[in-house]
Amino acid sequence: MIALLRTPARRIALAVALSALVHVLMLWLPHMTLPRFDSQLPLLTAKLEPVPILPRKPAPPKQKTVRRHKPAKPKPTPPAPKILASKSAPPTVPVIPAAEKATQDATGAGEAYDNRNKTNIPHLPKHAQLRFAAYLGSSSTYIGEMRHNLEILEDGHYMLQAELRTVGLARLFKSYNLSQTSRGSVTPNGDLKPEEFSEERIDEHGKQDASSRFDWNRHVADFANGTQETLPDHSQDILSFLYQLSQESFDRELVPLTISNGKKLESYQLEVSGVEDVITPMGKLRTLHLRKMHDRGEEGLEIWLGLEYRMLPVKFLQIDRSGKIAGALAIKEIRLSDK
């Protein structure tokens, strides 16, 4: 049999003979039916039913948050104020910044003024620098700054300078520069005795100069315009008198003064209006209010002296001839030293 299948032709012939034999058998053998094994699967149906509602678990009770209040921190005890009101004041006075308010008790300041006499008047500092904010009219429109500089020299002389300049937009409407200088001596009891005064103004009308000399030997005041006037005792110039006021006892309602403005001598009568509080860039200050007496049609002046600050000037008001406020100055910084 194996020998018959060795060649391909014999293998093909054998396959054809087997295939013919199978077909003959299928045609002539009886018909047979094979059993079927189809499984009957159940019919898929859908039925809608309500979803059962399960009871909710009760929420745990909320715990109340107890806020614990922190105990308030005790406020620090303010330092005791320094009162500058006697000749025996400490040799060095601390710098007083613009933001610091006066801390001395107002009633105490008033009592210090009421008990004031020539024996407990505070002496002028050897060095003082004061800065004032300048305002236009009665409004709060800031237009510039004025600076005062006082130097008491070792040889018993003093030099006092003041300078006012408008700044910012104010210069577009009213450019105004003012420079004043007062020189003289300091008497043994601390009074200022001016010998020279000069002033220079620059505004929209141009430059204006004025000056005066005090001849105490002849009791004559000489002015740059060529005029002369008799010089009364204790006369002052328009700048020095602001600081000489700190040496007054104010034991009367009216304080008479003779003042030079560089062109002539003028008689002032300052009314002592009393102790009052004023608001400044340094805060609320306890002051002594002075008012220049003047007739209608004359210029006026109001001055406030700081009771806590050796009676130095801390506020000014200038009144024009119509009775309106022409300008105001309010202290913004004080620097003092006795060294």
Image: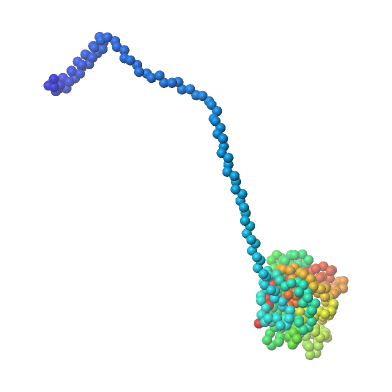
The outermost residue toward the bottom is 217
Residue shown at the point (34%, 16%) measured from the top left:
36
Determine whether, in the image, residue 296 is placed left or right of residue 168. Answer: right
The part of the image, by quadrant, that contains residue 90 is bottom right
Asked if 212 appears above or below 280 in the picture, the reply is: below
Give 244 or 138, whichever is nearer the viewer: 244
- Is residue 323 in sight in this rendering? yes
Q: Nearer the viewer, residue 46 or 171?
A: 46
Q: Position of residue 270 (x, y in %)?
A: 83, 76
Colouring of the image:
rainbow
Number of numbered markers: 0
Q: Residue at x 78, y 79 (%)?
A: 116
Q: Is residue 3 left or right of residue 140?
A: left
Quarter of the rendering occupied by the N terminus: top left
Extreme residue toward the left, this view: 3
Image quarter where the C terminus lies is: bottom right
Residue 307 x, y percent position in the rendering? 75, 75
Residue visible at 80% across and 90% down in the picture = 218
User: Could one spot residue 203 in this view of the protein?
Assistant: no
Judge left or right: residue 70 versus residue 105.
Answer: left
Across and down, in percent, residue 136 comes to: 76, 67
Towards the viewer: 332 or 158: 332
Q: Position of residue 164 (x, y in %)?
A: 72, 73
Which residue occupies the foreground of this view, 69 or 95? 69
